[in-house]
Image: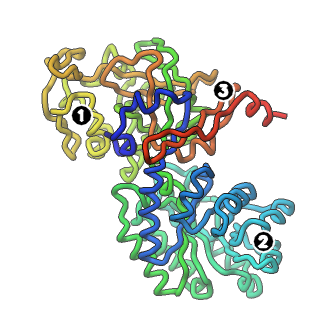
Amino acid sequence: MQIQFKGLEKYDIEKLFKDVQTPCYILDEATFIKNGEILKSLQEETGAKVLLAEKAFSNFTVFPLLSQYLAGTEASGLFEARLGHEEMPGKEVHVFSAAYGDKDFKEVLKYADHIIFNSVYQLKKYGPLAKAAGKEIGLRINPECSTQEGHAIYDPCSPGSRLGVTREIFDLEMDTDTLSLLSGLHSHTLCEQDSDALEITVKAIKEKFGDILPKMKWINLGGGHHITRHDYNIPLLKKIILDLKKTYNLDVYLEPGEAVALNAGYLVTKILDIVRNSGHNIAILDMSAACHTPDVIEMPYMPPLLNSYPITNDINTSTSVVESSAVSDPSKLSVSSPVLDPSALSTSSPVNCAGPDAFTETMTDLFGDVFGDVFGDAINDIFGDDTDVSSSGSVSGNSASGNPSSTDSSSGKLSSVEHIYRLAGPSCLAGDVIGDYAFGHDLNRDELLVFGDMAIYSICKNNTFNGIPLPAIYLLKKDGTIELIKKFSYEDFKERLG
């Protein structure tokens, strides 16, 4: 089973989800606990403090559980700050905003204990008020050190970024009295990255602001740390934290969002209809990419799907395939350079599917070595348990007879891949498409599909475009029972419109 679904491996999926209302999000209590234990251990061994970045995950139903493992919450504005204050009582509440307004700032003072400013101007304007209210005050800095590629929309250090104060502006605008207001510095530069990227970033912070750090009580290294990912380099992270504490006598904060909820949620959806166009089988689901998983279109990326794997997510260009957007998180796959006409991916003419060897050789060319590492279990599910996917992505085992539709009569498993479907939503948006996925069988109307890693940046960003209802939210408890958290109705759609 793919990494993103390890929390489901002991269950019969059809039985587990037979009574849920689709589409729905499922929060996985056991995976939250697993992630929480990793983060708690990090704090105990380094003295660092880990906060939940609510922008990624803010389902407060599990806040009492998370409070056992975390130091508090990090908010991006007034409402998140209030939510953290109310639902994790007694824990720290940090807030950062690119700019505060007078009305909101007065409210923020009621809920936050650490307030971080994005400019020297706002620090001068609101810092004295925050200080008088007994708050810890921070300034977001921009170390002008980008460690990301291909996702400028998520890169706070991209040229012309509005986020954080560069050293040039710091020197121009800062004065002694304003500097004395500060308790700490904040730097958020990462997105779904490993600790090697943080090591590069911290080196840049030291080079640019090393003379300021000794004057501070704390440093907040922001989010984007994939600490709970299976291959994350935790020993290096510990080394970085301990070095900062020893060198500058600083408290160190981290505020990951994804690491807290990584792989701790699923989106269960049902196939409403299957249509055909230009050689493509298109399954129309009761979930919408545009409404229920907006990052699929915004990034774009293709979410992991249980017992399947992605082929392409570009329907507008006739010459695009996908590759790993980052080896560190190959579950998120984005459009690559023109390589292959996706018409070749239709079920009538699948990609090099004379057998598992040939197919996976093609996919390894597209994805790189990471293909076998991430999708090996899915390949085994599709081709049969006697198929071996090596770390280089090559497949060995029973090969097909050369007929793209042949099966292994003894196991009923496909010997080749011809079951490729485009998964799409029910909205009027032509681009409401998740992407093309390979399956080991023909899909059927009313069949359930399960997307993975859906706790983060899905529930908190969804919407009701077209009047499409919001998915229900359930909690899969560690004992295997499922508890309804929230169902949404027409009134939820109507009330936000007037």
- 90 lies left or right of 128: left
Q: Which mark is residue 380?
A: 1
The residue sitting at 49% across, 83% down in the picture is: 245
- 126 lies left or right of 401: right
How far apart marks 2 and 3 lie (CA) works out to 42 Å
Q: Is residue 36 above or below residue 252?
A: above
Q: Mark 3 points at which residue?
A: 468
Q: Which of marks 1 and 2 is nearer the N terminus?
A: 2
The residue sitting at 63% across, 78% down in the picture is: 184
Q: Is residue 372 above or below residue 205?
A: above
x then y, percent, for residue 89? 67, 65
How far apart marks 1 and 2 lie (CA) works out to 58 Å
Q: Which amino acid does label 3 sit on?
A: Ile
Residue 389 location, quadrant: top left
Residue 347 location, quadrant: top left
Closer to the camera, 64 or 39?
64
x then y, percent, for residue 236? 37, 71
x then y, percent, for residue 359? 24, 29
Q: Which of marks 3 and 1 is nearer the N terminus?
A: 1
Residue 114 location, quadrant: bottom right
